[in-house]
Image (cartoon, rainbow, N blue to C red):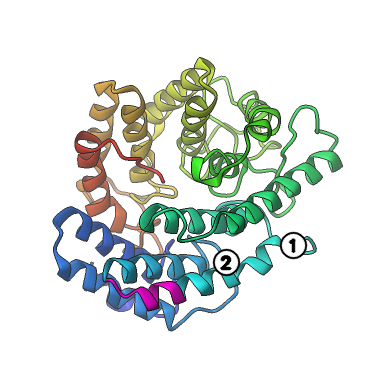
Amino acid sequence: MEEGLKTADPHDCSAYTGWTGIALLYLQLYRVTCDQNYLLRSLDYVKRTLRNLNGRRVTFLCGDAGPLAVGAVVYHKLKSDGESQECITKLLQLQRTIVCRDSDLPDELLFGRAGYLYALLYVNTEMGPGAVCESAIKEVVDAIIESGKTLSKEERKAERCPLLYQWHRKQYVGAAHGMAGIYYMLMQPAAKVDQETLTEMVKPSIDYMRHKRFRSGNYPSSLSNETDRLVHWCHGAPGVIHTLMQAYKVFKEEKYLRDAVECSDVIWQRGLLRKGYGICHGTAGNGYSFLSLYRLTQDKKYLYRACKFAEWCLEYGAHGCRIPDRPYSLFEGECEEGAGFQHRRARVWSSGLSTWR
């Protein structure tokens, strides 16, 4: 991987396809091995990203929030509290763009408000509650909810879907650009959305999304798309399944677990992808759904399925898959599919921690 990275874009600092994703890989290796050298290697990549922030995007995966959040965590683990706090301060300075009512910023996970919310919750998860204050988180959550309410009223869907979202004028469903990813973030306990909002606004919106699924159990890429084709984390059942599992945890209704199981069957039948091995639209991303479902149900069938997808990924190059544009990146390439997927498979056995946080 290090050899391949010599030809990578030196200006791509994102977690999705750039240097922050590599920093996350080494941070994960440090967790597994407790080898300080991996943490220092992660720091090397963090420093590279922090020198090249461009201010164009503000999310964890594709913008400046990712390098700043990961930087805060790495410096924290190295007990460099001053540098860690500086990263958090710069992260919170991005908030003006996020909460501005006149902004054309979307709400989705890759490029929008939900992606910035992820960065704030990531810092608190890694560093402890209070690293980012609750008022900052609430301000972002409120902006996401108000945006969803506004579009729902404009589209005259307020009763059926109180929180409606779009990206480039299309109402996407999946985890990357759509409603599934936004609802998932709003249901995170650390987001502290009040129970009334969850019950009266988030829950009926999820039910509206559920009713748009195909007879196969898969989900459309957008509300207007009637083609049952994509089985990716970004579009389709592999992303929606995480939202359904979170809904089951929050609302305690069996229908969400049943739908999640149905999604898992779709992924098992159609989730080995020729498009590649990565998280976003590859087999490794699909395999995470089985790990999450195993953690939730303790049914070893899903651990078996996860292992089979992992074995397929580890036979890299044997399946005639397309080589991605960024083959050594976190979300498109083999970076997460290698050490990350293997480690998370082991973590399900040992600690039961979340596989998509």
Residue at position x 27%, y 47% from top? 341
Image: 240 above or below 43: above
| Residue 78 spot, x, y in % from top left | 26, 71
| Residue 67 spot, x, y in % from top left | 43, 70
| Residue 168 spot, x, y in % from top left | 71, 55
Crowd around label 2: few <14 · some 14–19 · many ≥20 (10 Å): many
Residue picked out by circle 1: 104
C-alpha distance separating marks 1 and 2: 13 Å
- Say which amino acid is labelled 1: Asp
Crowd around label 1: few <14 · some 14–19 · many ≥20 (10 Å): few
| Camera-side residue of 107 and 251 | 251
Q: Which residue is outermost to the bottom? A: 51
Residue at position x 41%, y 46% from top? 357
Q: Please say whether residue 311 is visible from this viewpoint.
A: no
Residue bounds of the magenta highlight: 79-86
Residue at position x 58%, y 76% from top? 55
Identify the element where label 1 is drawn: loop
Identify the element where label 2 is drawn: loop
Mark 1 / mark 2, whichever is N-terminal: 2
Residue at position x 54%, y 79% from top? 54
Residue picked out by circle 2: 58
Image: 173 above or below 329: above
Any magenta on residue 85?
yes
Res 332 quadrant in image? bottom left
* Quadrant position of the N terminus in the picture: bottom left
Res 83 quadrant in image? bottom left
